[in-house]
Image: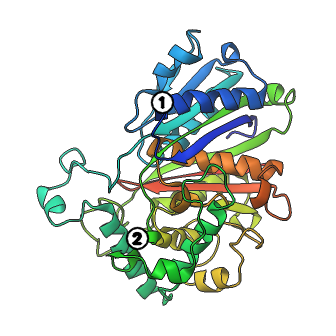
Amino acid sequence: MAHDVAIIGAGCRPFGRYLDTTAREEAVAAARLALADAGVSWPQIRYAVGGSMSAGSADTLVAELGLTGVPFINVFNGCATGSSSLLSAVQAIASGAAEYALVVGFDSHPRGAFTIDTDAMGLPAWYGSTGLAVTSQFFALKIQRYLHEHDLPPRLLATVAAKAFRNGSLNPNAWRRKPLTEDEINASMMLNDPLRQYMLCSPGDGATALVLANADAAKRHADPIGVPAVAVRTRRPGSFEVLSPSLSVKRGVSPSVDAADAAYELAGIGPEDIDIAQLQDTDAGAEIIHLAETGLCEHGEQAELIDSGATEIGGRLPVNTDGGCLANGEPIGASGLRQIHESVLQLRGRAGERQVAATPRTALCHVYGAPGLSACTILTR
């Protein structure tokens, strides 16, 4: 689909909880960082797209970036907001509508779990009154069942979380920069069995931006990163997803499976060709599940893969090298683009202390969220 589209600039602002600035101001800063990285001026951008759940409309950023009349599209698609924005820009460039495009994602969320309006989600009132609208409860139910069905040890949850905090400690943009041991994680408060406090990410603030170019323009810029595939998929019958109020007798695959399969097909590669992966880890269990759902291992093989060190920065398949959602938090509009930003740095060999040993050539970025959708992006050098 998009072999003729490349990322030529990337900018990311520190994630966390902003006190002396706003997510919108940081979005402007991230956009300017991406433009400077690309060596492109704002008037050269002929298409812009971005999204935020709670921090404002992306198109209002033109007030600071410049009133050029550029088409600027607002996107909101849950946790896939960033990836959906990227898909829009990729398609605009591939169609010939623009030579350069800007993608931006930003958000700001208060402390505590996300609030959910069951009526707006098409769910009955009992879904909220029973506590299932608290997403951490759904994630706990999902991983509890998954560990049981695939005979995986619950200890993996602390192992995955400890890796995230180690990697986050090497990332200057991460929110949680203190490494935590597995013992410290296991000693934290139990929130929704089997998930403890440090096994769940926190909603927070953040901003990330990218500049894309068509093939001809990309040749004029240093270190372009190809975007051969972006795929977004929603749930099908029988899948058990966030805000899915029942479990079907007939089981179906997750939208993560469909999004990953579509991305591999578009890119003309398979999961065995992936050198580095950024997977949605809203909770530690999500990374375990998504390793298999994106085809990076078989269901039930996660213990062997994780225990071997394969998913560490120095392993054969590094996962969530910037600390993922666990270390960075999850500002909905920015989170997916943060994954892209990290993968661009890794593919360029510019990730600093967390740079993987052999500069990778292919990267997979995966997001997943309510009410049951997923997006997968493949990048190549």
Residue under the point 76% across and 63% down: 275
Residue 226 or residue 281, whichever sits in front: 281
Amino acid on which the number 1 mark rests in the picture = Arg
Tell me where residue 132 sits by quadrant.
bottom left
Query: Circle 1 is placed at which residue position?
Result: 24
Q: Is residue 242 left or right of residue 301?
A: left
Query: Circle 2 is placed at which residue position?
Result: 197
Bin the neighbour count of mark 1 within 10 Å (Cα to Cα): few under 14, some 14-19, many 20 and up. Answer: many
Q: Position of residue 69 (x, y in %)?
A: 55, 9
Bin the neighbour count of mark 2 within 10 Å (Cα to Cα): few under 14, some 14-19, many 20 and up. Answer: some
Residue under the point 71% across and 84% down: 308
Residue 228 or residue 347, whichever sits in front: 347
Amino acid on which the number 2 mark rests in the picture = Gln
Residue 374 or residue 17, whichever sits in front: 17
Residue occupying the far top of the picture: 68
CA–CA distance between discs 1 and 2? 29 Å
Q: Position of residue 231 (x, y in %)?
A: 57, 48
Residue 361 or residue 198, whichever sits in front: 198
Q: Is residue 196 left or right of residue 337?
A: left
For residue 13, above or below residue 366: above
Q: Is residue 105 left or right of residue 138?
A: right
Residue under the point 40% across and 29% down: 56
Tell me where residue 131 sits by quadrant.
bottom left
Q: Position of residue 60 (x, y in %)?
A: 46, 20
Indicate the secondary structure of the residue bearing disc 1: helix
Can residue 381 be seen in this snapshot?
A: no
Residue occupying the far front of the picture: 20
First in sequence, mark 1 or 2: give its number: 1
